[in-house]
Structures are given as structure tokens and as C-alpha cells.
Image (cartoon, rainbow, N blue to C red):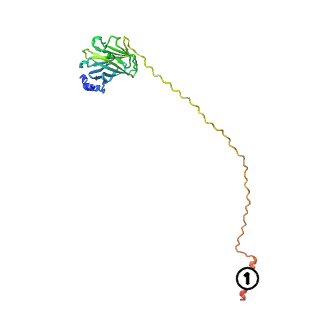
């Protein structure tokens, strides 16, 4: 069934509308602990600097997503609803993102029937110890410790979760107690055996890669310059004396007479003719 179809199982004091919005991941009251409803179970933040961001149902588990911000990393989550439906257990996937500035090298999970009271072996609440097919495991930690302490716990180590990385824990929770409410305590960097919280050194800064050495620059060679041949100075040229032009002789212009003067012979002839004429006229 879908998550929305199971929103009716929210306790009435929370209100159906608010529970539906929480289921859809659309509502979170800033002044109130976040509540997530998955199928018939209600998950609620109790203490610690963390937030439930969303949840979903997979084919065989209920998966919740959480962001841990710190500095208080003693995280308590309440779980309610098994008795209401007559169930005795379920498989849980806790997906946690490290939003602190410290790497995680341990991660402890503990079940408590009463808040802040270690759960004894005979209370019916456990991580299904003794069932090989549902043993706890993690995608980031390779070592699982369930026997060092006398309490219902699973401690993971053998890995590291750096800031802004995410780790997934998968285990089975059984609850035969009559109480319908129990608590899941999660503690990053908590070591079992009385060690308690450890503080691993911060992740060293990433080394700065050396700057690549630029390839040698070949010297700029100027192209060969042809030798400059001085200009050949021609021998001095003797000045050329232009030939002296012949003297210009102005033509003599004869004056034009106002009256033509005949030559003497002509004059004599004319006079003779005049005389003759004159004499001829008289003779006649």
C-alpha cells in the first residue's frame, strides 16, 4: 500500500491533515519535533541535533532519512504503533547524513523500552538476536558488535563517514512488550566497552595539487637580416653646357610708303604719254 493510504493511523491528537502533510514531506513545524508516519508506525524526534527529512516504504523495509547537524549527537527517536496493529517487528533502514564537521568512525544503535533506561535482555525488545537471516549490516562499516555490552545494542565500526557523506544501517527490530512505545537511540562516534564517545581527528585538508610547470619557452630568434649594401654613388656627371644658339637677327622691315613712287623710267614714260595726249587733243 502507498504511504498516503496509511495516513489514517496517525494519533488523533496530531490531526489527520498534519499527518498527511508529514507523510508527503510537505510539513515540518520549526518549533516542534518532526513526526513521520510510515505504514502503521509513527516516528518522532525526541532529543538530539538531527532532523527526520523524509521516509518511504521499500519492498521489505521501512526507510527513514535523517540529517545529523550536532553538536548534540545523542539522538533519540520514538517509535509507536506495533501493538495497535498486532505486529511484533519490522525491518528498518536508517539512512543518516553527516552534516557535522567531524568524521564518524563508530555508530551505535540502542533500543530502550523506557526513555534513557538500558533495555535488559528479558523485556522482549531486541535487534532479533539469534536470527542469522536478519543480522545488522551497513554499507559504510564492515564490523558489527552486538556482544560487548549488556544492553540491546548494535555498534558499527571498520569504516569512516566523512562530513556530508551518507551511511545506511539495516536491521530488524522485535518488540513483544505490552507497551506500544519504545525508543531508538543513535550515537555517532560512540565506542562500546565503556569507551564512550570518541573524537577522531578532523579530516586532513585535501592537498593542493602542484601547479603544473609551464613548458620552456623557446627563445625568440629574429630572422637573419641581409647585410645592407651601401648605395653605389655614380660618378659625377660633368654639367652639360647647352649649345649657344645663334644670334637672333631681327628681320628688317621696310617701311610701307604712303604713295608709291614709280621708278624714273616709268615716270618719264608717263610724262611722255601725258604730253602726247595733251598734244593729241590739241592737234585734234
Q: Position of residue 198 (x, y in %)?
A: 39, 14
| Most foreground residue, 70 or 130 | 130
Q: Residues within 10 Å of mark 1 (few under 14, many from 20)?
A: few
30 relative position to 255: left or right: left
Res 223 → quadrant:
top right
| Most foreground residue, 245 or 106 | 106
237 relative position to 124: left or right: right
Q: Position of residue 149 (x, y in %)?
A: 34, 11
Circle 1 residue: 273
Q: Is residue 74 visible?
A: no
Q: Is residue 229 positioned above or below 148 on the image? A: below
280 relative position to 74: left or right: right
Q: Residue at x 31, y 17 (%)?
A: 172
| Most foreground residue, 246 or 193 | 193
Res 277 → quadrant:
bottom right
Q: Is residue 1 positioned above or below 131 on the image? A: below
Res 10 → quadrant:
top left
Q: Residue at x 28, y 11 (%)?
A: 122
* Quarter of the figure with the C terminus: bottom right
| Most foreground residue, 47 or 171 | 171
Q: Position of residue 220 (x, y in %)?
A: 59, 33
Residue lying at the far front in this picture: please name it: 133
For label 1, the SS is helix
Q: Residue at x 28, y 16 (%)?
A: 174
Amino acid at each position: 500500500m502507498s504511504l498516503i493510504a496509511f495516513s489514517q493511523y496517525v494519533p488523533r491528537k496530531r490531526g489527520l491533515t498534519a499527518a498527511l502533510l508529514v507523510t508527503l514531506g510537505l510539513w515540518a513545524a520549526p518549533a516542534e519535533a518532526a513526526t513521520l508516519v510510515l505504514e502503521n508506525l509513527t516516528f518522532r524526534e525526541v532529543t538530539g541535533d538531527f532532523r527526520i527529512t523524509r521516509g518511504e516504504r521499500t519492498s521489505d523495509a521501512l526507510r527513514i532519512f535523517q540529517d545529523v547537524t550536532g553538536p548534540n549527537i545523542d539522538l533519540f527517536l520514538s517509535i509507536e504503533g506495533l501493538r495497535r496493529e498486532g505486529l511484533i517487528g519490522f525491518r528498518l533502514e536508517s539512512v543518516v547524513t553527516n552534516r557535522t564537521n567531524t568524521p564518524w568512525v563508530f555508530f551505535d544503535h540502542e533500543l530502550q523500552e523506557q526513555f534513557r533506561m538500558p533495555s535488559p535482555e528479558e523485556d522482549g525488545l531486541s535487534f532479533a538476536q539469534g536470527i542469522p537471516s536478519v543480522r545488522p549490516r551497513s554499507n559504510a562499516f564492515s564490523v558489527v558488535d552486538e556482544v560487548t555490552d549488556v544492553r540491546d545494542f548494535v555498534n558499527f565500526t571498520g569504516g569512516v563517514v566523512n562530513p556530508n557523506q551518507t551511511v545506511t544501517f539495516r536491521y530488524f527490530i522485535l518488540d513483544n512488550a505490552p507497551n506500544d512505545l519504545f525508543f531508538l537511540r543513535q550515537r555517532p562516534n560512540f565506542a562500546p566497552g565503556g569507551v564512550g564517545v570518541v573524537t577522531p581527528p578532523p579530516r586532513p585538508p585535501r592537498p593542493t595539487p602542484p601547479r603544473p610547470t609551464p613548458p620552456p619557452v623557446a627563445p625568440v630568434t629574429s630572422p637573419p637580416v641581409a647585410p645592407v649594401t651601401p648605395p653605389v654613388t655614380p660618378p659625377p656627371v660633368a654639367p652639360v653646357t647647352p649649345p649657344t644658339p645663334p644670334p637672333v637677327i631681327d628681320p628688317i622691315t621696310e617701311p610701307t610708303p604712303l604713295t608709291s613712287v614709280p621708278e624714273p623710267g616709268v615716270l618719264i614714260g608717263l610724262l611722255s604719254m601725258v604730253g602726247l595726249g595733251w598734244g593729241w587733243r590739241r592737234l585734234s
